[in-house]
Image: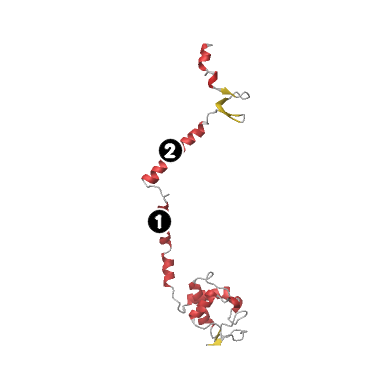
Amino acid sequence: MATDNAKKPPVEDYEYDTLTNERLIKDHDYDGIRELDNDLPTWWKWLFYITIVFSVVYMIRLWVFHSDDLVQEREFAIEMEEAAAKTPTDTKAAGEFQLVLLEDEASLASGKETWDKICAVCHLVDGGGLVGPNMTDNYWIHGDKLDQQFKIITNGVIEKGMIPYRDQLSEQKRLEVISYVMVKLQGTTPANPKEPQGDPY
């Protein structure tokens, strides 16, 4: 019996739940509720230890050796380098854009494609005019110069029902379609031309 008593902790060291016979935290109760003094699961303890080790290693790599790419300044620099590597051609092309009449076949073919897809709805495929004015005669409402036409297609004429195309067509596409009108449509004879509008030029 003495041996059995030696193995067990003194009764006063622990208190036990009367229903489950599990150990209670001594002198720890609130509003009659007693908390069990159960050990944490082994897997939980090891997970906790691993997170501590990971945190220490992470902090050393980040702030001592600067070997991780998680520093905001480094991320920003890398992204800026990647962006610069991807867009030099676009930047150069945008800087080189010039508002000059295009007469090469590739540009005029591209302009016709835009015309047929977007502009023909209001001006007809042959440019004779429907809701929009006749684009084949010498009468112009807002001027016949290239820069004037570019401004019209860019900003639109809302009061006349023409929307701006600056967000739908690139500068190059806008220039191509205007060049197509001036080179290919101007001076032609549409099937059913609309009456002249604007001033003669």
Q: Residue at coordinates 44% horizontally, 66% vertically from top-left? A: 90
Q: Position of residue 157 (x, y in %)?
A: 57, 77
**Which residue type does callout 2 highlight?**
Val
Spatial CA distance of label 1 from label 2 is 30 Å
Q: Is residue 21 above or below residue 166?
A: above
Q: Position of residue 7 (x, y in %)?
A: 51, 17
Given residues 26 and 37, the one toward you in this image is: 26
Crowd band around label 2 with a 10 angstrom C-alpha radius: few (<14), some (14–19), many (20+): few
Q: Residue at coordinates 43% horizontally, 38% vertically from top-left? A: 53
Q: Earlier in the sequence, mark 1 or mark 2?
A: 2
Q: Is residue 89 visible?
A: yes
**Relative to residue 72, is residue 189 drawn left or right?**
right
Q: Is residue 124 visible?
A: no
Crowd band around label 1 with a 10 angstrom C-alpha radius: few (<14), some (14–19), many (20+): few
Given residues 178 and 162, the one toward you in this image is: 162
> Which residue lies under the disc numbered 2?
53
Q: Position of residue 56 (x, y in %)?
A: 41, 40
Q: Residue at coordinates 53% horizontally, 14% vertically from top-left? A: 5
> Which residue lies under the disc numbered 1?
77
**Relative to residue 201, is residue 94 drawn left or right?**
left
**Which residue type does callout 1 highlight?**
Ala
Q: Quadrant of residue 188?
A: bottom right
Q: Is residue 186 above or below residue 46?
A: below
Q: Quadrant of the N terminus?
A: top right
- Taking the view exactly as shown, the residue that stands out farthest to the bottom is 200
Q: Is residue 183 above or below residue 91?
A: below
Q: Residue at coordinates 48% horizontally, 34% vertically from top-left? A: 46
Which secondary structure lies at badge 2?
Answer: helix
Which secondary structure lies at badge 1?
Answer: helix
- Taking the view exactly as shown, the residue that stands out farthest to the top is 1
- Taking the view exactly as shown, the residue that stands out farthest to the left is 65
Q: Is residue 156 above or below residue 5?
A: below
